[in-house]
Amino acid sequence: MAAQVEIYTWSTCPFCIRAKSLLKKKGVDFTEYVIDGDEEARDKMAQRANGGRSVPQIFINDQHLGGCDDIHALDAQGKLDPLLA
Ligand SMILES: N[C@@H](CCC(=O)N[C@@H](CS)C(=O)NCC(=O)O)C(=O)O
């Protein structure tokens, strides 16, 4: 079964665009929550993301992965593909 990938974004955030590019390159489907200016949604995201309030915040199978730097670091270590499999 494919991994369930979720990403919270702002539409103009360069880190979000970069993180989504990596996911697209990996060919995985993901659910995007665009939360531009929605502070209530951001609060809920932060609760899920162990307090992380910057965007993007990425989840794989309901587990918090982190942001753009985190997903690229995992990929560089060869640890992202197994999570997405
Ligand atoms: N190191 C973070 C940087 C993300 C970041 O700085 N995002 C900006 C938007 S492009 C942000 O959320 N700024 C508002 C804040 O940090 O409260 C990552 O790799 O995801």
Image: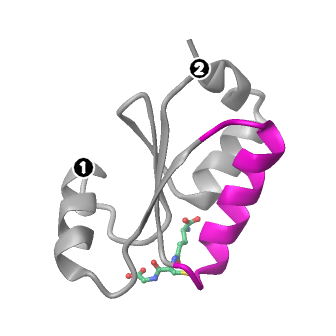
Check the image and name the residue furthest to the top: 1
Q: Is residue 40 magenta?
A: no
Q: Out of 21 and 77, give the one closest to the viewer.
A: 21
- Residue occupying the point 59% across, 50% down: 70
Measuring from the top left, give residue 60's x and y in whole percent.
47, 34
Measure how far apart labels 1 and 2 are at the Cα level: 21 Å
- Residue occupying the point 83% across, 46% down: 25
Does 61 sit above or below residue 20?
above
Q: Which residues are magenta?
A: 11-29
Quarter location, residue 36: bottom left
- Locate residue 46 relative to residue 11 in the image: left or right: left
- Residue occupying the point 59% across, 20% down: 2
Q: Out of 82 and 11, give the one closest to the viewer.
A: 11
For discs 1 and 2, the disc positioned in front in the rendered view? 2
Classify the position of the C terminus by image quarter: top right
Q: Is residue 28 magenta?
A: yes
- Locate residue 10 relative to residue 16 in the image: left or right: left
Residue designated by label 1? 48
- Tell me the element at label 1: helix
Measuring from the top left, give residue 78's x and y in whole percent.
77, 28
- Locate residue 4 relative to residue 50 in the image: left or right: right
Residue designated by label 2? 2
The amino acid pointed to by label 2 is Ala
Crowd class of label 1 (few under 14; some 14 to 19; many from 20; radius 10 Å): some
Classify the position of the N terminus by image quarter: top right
Does 13 sit above or below residue 18?
below
